[in-house]
Amino acid sequence: MSISEVDVSPTADPLDNPIASTDQEVWRLIRAEQERQEHTLELIASENHASRAVMAAMGTCLTNKYAEGYPGARYYGGCKFVDGIEDHARDRAKKLFGCAHANVQPHSGAQANAAAFFALLNPGDTFASLVLADGGHLSHGMKINLSGKYYKPVHYPLRYDQDADGYEQIDFDAVRTVCREHKPKMILCGYSAYPRTIDFARFREIADECGALLMADIAHIAGLVAAGVHPSPFPHCDIVTTTTHKTLRGPRGGMILTNDEQIAKKVDKAVFPGLQGGPLMHVIAAKAVCFNEALQPAFKAYAKQVAANAKALAGALVEKGYRLVSGGTDTHLMLVDLRARNADVTGVDAEHWLEAAGIITNKNGVPQDPRPPRVTSGLRLGTPATTTRGLTEPQMGQLADWIDRIVASGGDEKVTREVREQVVGLCKQYPIAH
Ligand SMILES: *Cc1c(COP(=O)(O)O)cnc(C)c1O
């Protein structure tokens, strides 16, 4: 659909939004994006479809309120109701993750990580994280990121030995070697493109051996952790950061959790006034709504289905001749190495071809990828969003068929048109619940 075809009448909007009558330019683009989300299949592993209640909380008068500080200790008057909101968000977060302290103010996952570093490290301190090209996040020590400029990252690689058990999985011997050599003040685990269960207890052993703090960044797997589909980082980790918008299906935002009272105090100071000013109270309200949703039995079933769908999609792709990094998935995501299917197809090609057919993915480097990051040999696929709209295992087989038809045809126009029509048909059968 082109932008001029979008229905911008006020009644076309399920959220009943007044922008329709105040700002046609922005309204048209919002409606176009809404149509795009409705009629494409979202396989980007870090995305999801938040509930109408979560989105509604973000569109409230709470955005008008300044509430620097924390509940009961604010720098502004008029905070009695937003205090209640932040209290609910924190209490629900603690219940959801089974921990003693929660800071719900970080504006995003990267902000949460910056605050965790600011709280626990001094400039120039060493920390250990996964080789970024093996599935890490830019806030874990990329050279041009704050984490790489103000601190000293050292990296542990995945297991690269093809004949070894645990090929392309966390190599705890390598973690130990890197930590013995560099004596990091903190060890980071938790990743952006790693499809396997993280063994927090084994990281704890190594952290204890070298006297390091242990930080888990569960940005991707938070929803699975909350539902018990992935093991909890507690009690093993000293500090846990996360986003709230990925598998947790809340508003775009971040959060920091800990069981340690001293660390909690440092974190609160680091977030405000160390790093941020006024908290986004409308987003914190949406976090509270999201956490309440995630505490319901239905969310457990959702998270289980997310993992079951990922297994089904992974299995169907392997049957068609694709190779999966680490050989499979335990979580919501998989990293597809396209070279096994066709040595000439790149990640960037596949991403573009699939998008033309209404299947939204992102190119992603595979471990030791010979191609540069703008090209890559891989695709990262995740099931959180399609599971939210109700797809189950049979449709995962269908999705694998479509992906393979497109990739095998080299983005052929006729094949793309046929798949696009079928994708729209499936989207109409499984609308995003508004
Ligand atoms: C997505 C992600 C983040 C960053 O989240 P933003 O909200 O985009 O800043 C941090 N860490 C990991 C591991 C992630 O995957």
Image (tube, grey):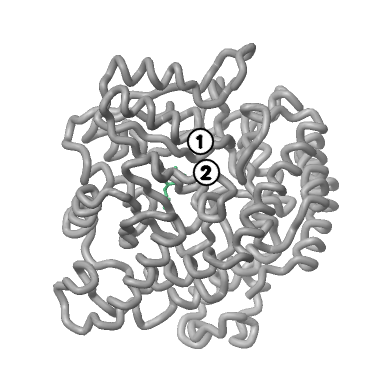
Q: Secondary structure at mark 1?
A: loop
Relative vertical location of residue 353 with respect to residue 370 in this rendering, above or below: below
Q: Nearer the viewer, mark 1 or mark 2?
A: 2
Residue annotated with mark 2: 231
Q: Is residue 417 left or right of residue 129?
A: right
Which residue corresponds to the image point at 70% horizontal and 46% vertical from the top-left?
354
Q: Return the residue nearer the eye: 221 or 408.
A: 221
Residue plotted at (52% across, 83% down): 17
Q: What's the distance in space between the residues labelled 1 and 2, CA to CA?
A: 8 Å
Give the vertical position of 6 relative to 133 (above or below). below
Which is nearer the N-term, disc 1 or disc 2? 1
User: Residue 82's quadrant in the figure?
Assistant: bottom left
* Quadrant the N terminus occupies: bottom right
Q: Is residue 33 above or below residue 384?
A: below
Report the quarter where the C terminus lies. bottom right
Looking at mark 1, is its residue's CB closer than 8 Å to ligand 1? no
State the mark number for residue 198: 1
In the displayed structure, would residue 408 be above or below residue 21? above
Image coords of residue 90 (percent x, y): 35, 65
Say whether marks 1 and 2 touch (CB < 8 Å): yes
For this view, does 68 lie left or right of residue 113? left
Q: Residue furthest left?
A: 75
Q: Secondary structure at mark 2?
A: loop
Q: Residue at x 27, y 78 (%)?
A: 65
Residue 101, x across and y down, in percent? 31, 57
Q: Foreground residue, 326 or 349?
A: 326
